[in-house]
Amino acid sequence: ELKVEQNPLFLSMQEGKNYTIYCNYSTTSDRLYWYRQDPGKSLESLFVLLSNGAVKQEGRLMASLDTKARLSTLHITAAVHDLSATYFCAVGETSGSRLTFGEGTQLTVNP
Amino acid sequence: KAGVTQTPRYLIKTRGQQVTLSCSPISGHRSVSWYQQTPGQGLQFLFEYFSETQRNKGNFPGRFSGRQFSNSRSEMNVSTLELGDSALYLCASALGGWRDTQYFGPGTRLTVL
């Protein structure tokens, strides 16, 4: 059974600082997604990573994938308050034909 | 392009009742997946439907069931509700299945009293 672990689960940071969220998974997968969820809202797709070494960037967020290490990172550059949300990684489970989500990282950016 | 819609948005039921939730996917999407989100268990996969057939099922009791219609709209049903069924139920649509990006609806917040 695929296990997906994110850390940290809670992250409080100051505006202007950089930080990284980590997503580890336990078995081979060929795709990984990052989603954002605002309080009381649904999930919004941010990135899909399909191959080893893939890197995607959008604004202050950059996601990368290392399939050999079974690790994805979501890097936040010069955080702003608008980035406050919960971020989920989701890993495609080939054998189970489904997505398995991490626990989520609740990010709070303080002025 | 209209997004995924779910109805109703909020529901309050009592233990033992049953409930039906509805999901309309993005036009052209044939895959609909359902997830349960709770603070304790996070996001858990319930099942996926494609072209009116259930292709995959998560680890939930038989009280949880679903179906998909020819227009790709989907419903999920929970019978004999338990307190632990209180959750946000999210529907996601995708073009062909789990290998495609899932687009999530706003969810139905179910409270069981």
Image (spheres, rainbow, N blue to C red):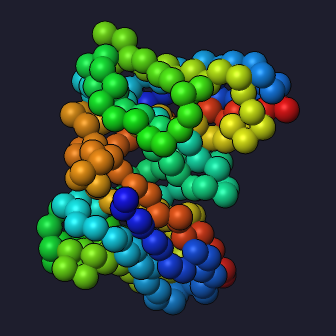
The image position of residue A16, as x and y in percent, is 52, 87
Which quadrant holds residue B62?
A: top right
- Please tell me whether residue B16 is drawn above or below residue B46 in the rendered image: above
Residue at screen point 72% across, 27% down? B81
- Please tell me whether residue A35 is drawn above or below residue A75 in the rendered image: above
Residue B80 in view (yes/no): yes
Judge by depth and name the residue closer to the eye, A22 or B27: A22
Residue at the extreme bottom: A17
Q: Quadrant of the C terminus of chain A?
A: bottom right
Q: Quadrant of the N terminus of chain A?
A: bottom left
Which quadrant holds residue B47?
A: top left
The image position of residue B88, as x and y in percent, is 63, 41
Residue at screen point 53% across, 51% down? B43
The image position of residue B104, as x and y in percent, is 44, 40
Judge by depth and name the residue closer to the eye, B41 or A110: B41
- Please tell me whether residue A111 is drawn above or below residue B84 in the rendered image: below
